[in-house]
Image (tube, rainbow, N blue to C red):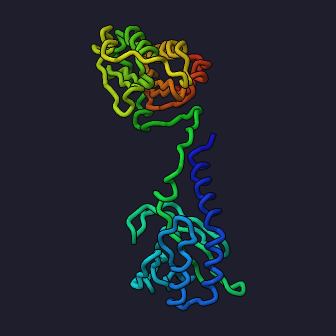
Amino acid sequence: MASIQQTILEKKEALAAAIDAPMADLARQCAQVWPDADALDHILQHGIGGVPNCHLLYAWDVNGIEISSLVTGTTLDKSWRGKDLSRRPYLKNHLPFKGIMLSSVYLSEPTKQLCVTALQAVSHKQTLMGFIAADFAVNDIVHDSLLTIPETRWQQFRGDPAVRGTVFMQQRATSLLDEHIDEVNDLIENLMCEHGVFHSKIHYSSGRCSIWLLDDPYNYRILSVEEIINPDICLAYPLHPYPKDAKTTPSQIRDVLEEFKALRFADETIYLRSSSLNIMNGMLGLTFSCDGSHYMPIQEFLDKDLSFWLGSLTKQ
């Protein structure tokens, strides 16, 4: 399962592989006429069509001064000749003395679009003369990309230090939701098993629940305690078969909700403030009174007992 950084790296590697040969060929041609601006423009405009998805080409010397025009497939902007590019974002990295280097994503000054720049070193007789820069719009690079499946692993995040520093000066106040927590859990279980709710979040202290439905995933609904404990709420949402591709079983929903309840009442100082459950990716979230947050796979959560949480949270 690829991480976000792995996915980004794969995209850049694919771009570098696609442009390696045509950029190297352009560098060899440009080296023969360097630094003749008109000759460079001719080579770049003739060669831009051979660099996949490239929308801008230009050449600059080792001091960061552009010596060619700004070249597109149909136009030459000679006003860019002589401009100092040394402050460009991609020059914050080490420049390549041979081959290609790809920049991070940045906002292009000429096009006002997010782009990536590929730098190709131009050398003659082992002497570095400058670089060919090729700009690629992010939209062109990722237009046919597929989303990667996010990682499902335990992640812990510390919250506000001010909250952590005063955690032992506070005490849990019983909320309206606390008084009806069994009814709340019953209704949430029913909505998730029978009515197409795939993600729910319970805010214990403020007494509200947020739910997302498979039939309307782009809109979430906020329910008050009075609404969520009303048995008639099931009439508001049509029946929906339990999704076959859910990573959470119906029986696990009840087990998770019971563990949420236990964490809410286990201690008067270290207690659960909010929790979330997503049956599709099999992940849940926990936020405690110390403002620490945890995200973890459901089965990993069910394998732990209260001593794990109260011990680690007291240390936190």
Left-right relation of 60 to 184: right
The residue at the far right in this view is 125
Task: Look at the picture and state if 194 lies above or below 121.
Answer: above
| Residue 267 makes an appearance in the image | no
The quadrant where residue 251 appears? top right
Residue 153 screen position, x and y as percent: 59, 33
Residue 307 screen position, x and y as percent: 58, 18
Across the whole image, how many numbered discs are drawn on residues?
Answer: 0
| Residue 127 makes an appearance in the image | yes
Residue 51 screen position, x and y as percent: 57, 69
Q: Quadrant of the N terminus?
A: top right
The quadrant where residue 276 appears? top left
Task: Look at the picture and state if 231 lies above or below 156.
Answer: above
Name the one closer to the observer, 205 or 284: 284
Left-right relation of 16 to 126: left
Task: Look at the picture and state if 202 lies above or below 89.
Answer: above
Question: Which residue is found at the position 40% from the left and 63% from the top?
Answer: 113
The quadrant where residue 164 appears? top left
Question: Which residue is found at the position 44% from the left and 85% from the top?
Answer: 81
Residue 181 screen position, x and y as percent: 39, 11
Question: Which residue is found at the position 37% from the left and 34% from the top?
Answer: 218
Name the one closer to the observer, 102 or 69: 69
Task: Look at the picture and state if 34 lies above or below 241.
Answer: below
Question: Which residue is found at the position 56% from the left and 77% from the top?
Answer: 47
Name the one closer to the observer, 98 or 191: 191
